[in-house]
């Protein structure tokens, strides 16, 4: 009888253990709904939000960015500045790639060199992040030395964007990785499969230097249609979704089985007025000239915008009014710039002072599928401009058409968006406001130009002292915002919905990283 009882107890215990393990196995599979598809599995090919986020699951840089885009150690545990152009990095010992090979200095050298190869035919290459590097050498297997062409205070920020691959892949092109071969990093998950515009499947890397993820397997499914993404969340087909549409946020948040995580993001919506052409195609005063060249007109347009109303009524609270190009808390944020003011009466006064007491005619162009509610925001802006006397027509179009035409300067006033990828002010000041040319201002579609701004920004880029550099970035920001070189609108919020047992610390870069998704036990 004693043996029978013991057998029964053991049988019951084994059954309980089997059930527990079955539940645990089920809980270890995570399904996430994404808003955009990865376009390449080569982490060095195409700079884009969806690609950068996916790469972080599989690859590491020498340094990474945390949820607020602050630099944190990754494959480098520490670093020091030897002189103005020489940095030395101590590498993390004991790290292995997903194929079992050891991580060493040779992998860093090969990865930096490979960026040029990966940039071929890229719509947006990673080469700007390594252009300042003159040489990378091995001091010993766990130490590398990087020499820059000039003082490069943003070297760490730039290196956070460069994925490290095994040295043997230095001459392997993007096509190989896009075929699902040699997608090998040191990150928390291993690559399993990729079906473009459908899904990416990952498996846990049990040897990850940062500790094992909670999830054995992760499936990241693409739902470009927001309604389909929300429907998948409601039905339980996925455990979590990103980019919750503003119209659905409040309703999803009321469900006891779900909860939301929302943070102010690093992507700013802004307006770029045509500032250098005497005659502009879609902005005309009574004499046919371009009113947008006058600073008073651009200031009047800014005063005509009720940013808080746009956030409250169109974005359902998922945004923050912007007075400058970086949000509070970012390196280079300028406290002296006042919060944006809605003052239509003063806007009319400024228009009159600029010589347009009866306003002028304007056609405002924007995308209708690139940013949350971009078409609705554009229509609201058109109405606000019209109320102060600027007779405004609004034309929206798909981003695939709009942005190429905007770059060709087919329009007079455009609405764009920019993410602060480097986590500090120069990452957006340079592209949007630096004088347009082969070495800068590539996103400056309004052609703003101020030599004092350019000089101040250039000095900031060469200043290694953080305190001095931040002051210079703040000065550059003050110059450009006083000129109304661009008109900031709002910072988009990033919002995730997830099942109630799950938690995720929202990131200001909007990345969805399953390593940081946890289920409360």
Image (spheres, helix red, strand yellow):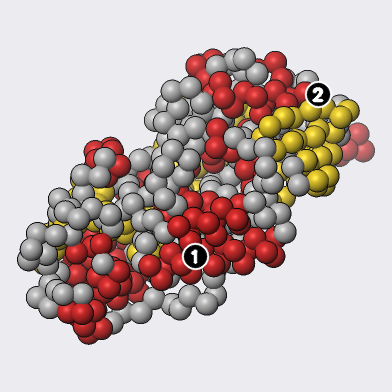
On screen, residue 350 versus residue 447, left or right, reads left
Q: Does 193 appear above or below 323? A: above
Q: Does 276 appear above or below 175? A: below
On screen, residue 476 versus residue 24, left or right, reads left
Find disc 1 in the rendering and name its residue. 477
- Residue at x 18%, y 59% (from the top left corner): 290
Number of other residues with Cα within 10 Å of mark 2, as a class: few under 14, some 14 to 19, many 20 or more? some
Give the position of the N terminus as an image quadrant. Answer: top right
Q: Earlier in the sequence, mark 2 or mark 1?
A: 2
Mark number for residue 102?
2
On screen, residue 476 versus residue 211, left or right, reads left
- Residue at x 88%, y 38% (from the top left corner): 6
- Residue 252 in view (yes/no): no
Instruction: Please state which of residues 493 and 243 is positioned toward the viewer in this rendering.
Output: 493
In three-dimensional space, the C-alpha distance between marks 2 and 1, rounded to whole angstroms, equals 45 Å
Instruction: Please state which of residues 72 and 477 is positioned toward the viewer in this rendering.
Output: 477
- Residue at x 57%, y 24% (from the top left corner): 116
- Residue 157 in view (yes/no): yes
Give the position of the C terminus as an image quadrant. Answer: bottom right
Question: Looking at the image, is mark 2 or mark 1 nearer the viewer?
Answer: 1
Instruction: Please state which of residues 353 and 185 is positioned toward the viewer in this rendering.
Output: 353
Q: Callout 2: helix, strand or loop?
A: loop
In which image quadrant can residue 215 be found? Answer: top right
Mark number for residue 252?
none
Q: Residue furthest front?
A: 451
Q: Does 398 appear above or below 201? A: below
Q: Callout 1: helix, strand or loop?
A: helix
Residue 28 position in % (x across, y down): 64, 39
Q: Residue furthest left?
A: 286
Number of other residues with Cα within 10 Å of mark 1, as a class: few under 14, some 14 to 19, many 20 or more? many
Residue 282 position in % (x across, y down): 14, 54
């Amino acid at each position: 009888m004693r043996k029978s009882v013991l057998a029964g107890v053991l049988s019951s215990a084994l059954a309980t253990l089997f059930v527990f393990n079955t539940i645990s196995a089920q809980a270890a599979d995570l399904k996430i709904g994404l808003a955009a598809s990865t376009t390449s599995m080569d982490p060095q090919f195409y700079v884009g939000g969806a690609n950068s986020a996916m790469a972080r699951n599989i690859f590491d840089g020498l340094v990474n960015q945390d949820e607020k885009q602050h630099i944190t150690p990754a494959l480098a545990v520490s670093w020091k500045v030897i002189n103005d152009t020489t940095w030395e990095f101590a590498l993390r010992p004991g790290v292995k790639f997903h194929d079992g090979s050891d991580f060493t200095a040779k992998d860093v050298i090969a990865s930096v060199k490979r960026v040029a190869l990966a940039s071929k035919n890229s719509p947006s290459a990673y080469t700007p992040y390594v252009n300042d590097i003159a040489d990378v050498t091995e001091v010993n297997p766990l130490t590398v030395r990087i020499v820059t062409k000039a003082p490069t205070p943003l070297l760490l920020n730039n290196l956070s964007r460069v994925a490290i691959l095994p040295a043997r892949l230095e001459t392997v092109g993007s096509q190989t990785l896009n075929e699902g071969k040699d997608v090998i990093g040191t990150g928390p998950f291993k690559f399993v499969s990729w079906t473009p515009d459908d899904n990416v499947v990952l498996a846990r890397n049990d040897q990850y230097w940062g500790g094992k993820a909670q999830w054995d397997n992760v499936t990241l499914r693409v739902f470009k249609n927001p309604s389909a993404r929300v429907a998948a969340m409601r039905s339980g087909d996925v455990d979590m979704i990103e980019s919750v549409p503003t119209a659905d946020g409040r309703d999803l948040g009321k469900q006891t089985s779900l909860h939301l995580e929302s943070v102010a993001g690093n992507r700013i919506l802004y307006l770029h007025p045509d500032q250098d052409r005497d005659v502009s195609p879609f902005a005309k005063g009574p004499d046919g000239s371009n009113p947008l060249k006058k600073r008073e007109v651009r200031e009047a347009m800014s005063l005509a915008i009720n940013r808080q109303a746009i956030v409250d009524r169109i974005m359902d609270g998922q945004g923050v009014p912007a007075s400058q190009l970086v949000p509070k808390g970012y390196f280079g944020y300028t406290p002296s710039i006042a919060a944006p003011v809605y003052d239509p009466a003063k806007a009319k006064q400024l228009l009159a002072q600029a010589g347009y007491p009866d306003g002028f005619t304007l056609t405002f162009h924007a995308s209708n599928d690139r940013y949350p509610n971009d078409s609705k925001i554009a229509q609201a802006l058109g109405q606000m401009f019209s109320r102060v006397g600027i007779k405004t027509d609004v034309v929206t179009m798909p981003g695939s058409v709009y942005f190429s035409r905007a770059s060709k300067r087919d329009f007079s006033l455009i609405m764009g968006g920019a993410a602060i990828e480097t986590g500090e002010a120069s990452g957006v000041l340079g592209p949007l406001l630096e004088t347009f040319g082969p070495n800068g201002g590539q996103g400056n579609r309004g052609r703003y130009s101020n030599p004092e701004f350019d000089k101040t920004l250039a000095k900031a880029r060469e200043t290694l002292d953080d305190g001095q550099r931040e002051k210079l970035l703040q000065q550059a920001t003050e110059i450009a915002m006083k000129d109304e070189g661009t008109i900031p609108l709002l910072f988009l919020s990033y919002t995730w919905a997830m099942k109630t047992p799950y938690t995720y610390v929202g990131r200001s870069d909007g990345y969805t990283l399953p390593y940081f998704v946890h289920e409360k036990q």
